[in-house]
Image (cartoon, rainbow, N blue to C red):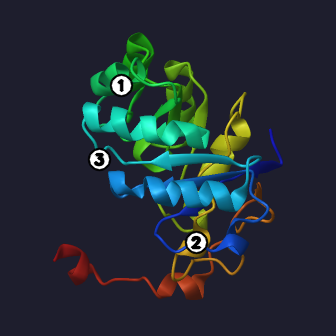
């Protein structure tokens, strides 16, 4: 079990904060459109050649668009592209057209999906999110079924959810890529007094204790739940 887990910084918009990217071994850029190649180029210039840069399209492109965008990204030494197209079949087709490694994310939500990924040779890595996969044990089973390196990643949870992602990362036999778990600071608030925040691109694996007073901020009545 690992005591520390490397995590990537996240760029979600056109404004770059070079200070916020310091100390990370990897940076992920959310590409909202195919026009964001210039943003990726700016990130590469900012972090230099020794930091991995990956992009995430959240399935926004068709195969032809993805091929063309990735061709433009390739000279920027991109580590991988997460979910450039929607389905596993499309991802498998695209993988045979491009030289940049691809990662599956939203199209893998079960061991059956992971087995299909492996059969198709659809991706070079798989992004694992503990919550939609049904917990840490289920996510480990998906990682094994996929047969490619896994990248534990958050869904913008509080530090309680991030702790589950860290537990997954700590338990994986191989952790080739920095994890997408450095997201606590993006929330307006948390449910613990000691949120899981990275130091120099690393998160320390530890338990998270929710604070009762902070939890009360998010309490809803039974009537609100029914509505």
In the drawing, what numbered circle is on residue 94?
Answer: 1
In the current view of this chain or complex, which residue is farthest to the right? 3
Query: Which of the two labelled residues, at mark 3 and mark 1, occupies the earlier sequence position?
Result: 3
Query: Which of the two labelled residues, at mark 1 and mark 2, occupies the earlier sequence position?
Result: 2
Residue at the image point whose x is 40% and y is 46% from the top:
132
Quarter of the figure that contains the C terminus: bottom left
- Residue 73 lies, in percent from the top left, at 49, 42
The one of 99 and 215 positioned closer to us in this rendering = 99
The one of 66 and 169 positioned closer to us in this rendering = 66
The one of 146 and 134 positioned closer to us in this rendering = 146
In the drawing, what numbered circle is on residue 16?
Answer: 2
Q: Are marks 2 and 3 in contact (CB under 8 Å)?
A: no
Q: From mark 3 to mark 1, how far is it between C-alphas?
A: 14 Å
Whether residue 164 is visible:
no
- What residue sits right under mark 3 in the picture? 60
State the SS at label 3.
loop
Q: As displayed, is residue 17 above or below residue 46?
A: below
- Residue 123 lies, in percent from the top left, at 46, 25
């Amino acid at each position: 079990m690992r005591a520390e887990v490397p995590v990537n910084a996240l760029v979600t918009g056109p404004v770059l904060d070079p200070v916020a990217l310091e100390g990370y071994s990897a940076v992920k850029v959310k590409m909202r459109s195919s026009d964001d190649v210039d943003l990726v180029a700016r990130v590469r210039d900012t972090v230099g050649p020794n930091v991995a840069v990956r992009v995430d399209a959240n399935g926004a492109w068709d195969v032809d668009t993805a091929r063309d965008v990735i061709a433009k990204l390739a000279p920027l030494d991109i580590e991988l592209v997460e979910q450039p197209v929607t389905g596993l079949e499309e991802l498998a087709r695209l993988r045979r057209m491009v030289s940049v490694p691809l990662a599956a994310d939203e199209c893998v939500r079960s061991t059956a999906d992971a087995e299909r990924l492996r059969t198709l040779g659809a991706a070079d890595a798989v992004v694992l999110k503990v919550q939609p996969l049904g917990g840490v044990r289920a996510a480990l089973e998906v990682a094994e079924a996929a047969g490619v390196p896994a990248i534990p990643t958050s869904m913008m949870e509080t530090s309680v959810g991030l702790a589950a992602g860290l537990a997954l990362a700590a338990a994986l036999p191989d952790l080739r890529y920095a994890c997408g778990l450095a997201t606590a600071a993006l929330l307006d608030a948390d449910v613990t007094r000691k949120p899981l925040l990275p130091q120099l691109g690393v998160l320390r694996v530890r338990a998270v204790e929710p604070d009762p007073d902070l939890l009360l901020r998010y309490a809803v009545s039974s009537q609100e739940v029914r509505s």
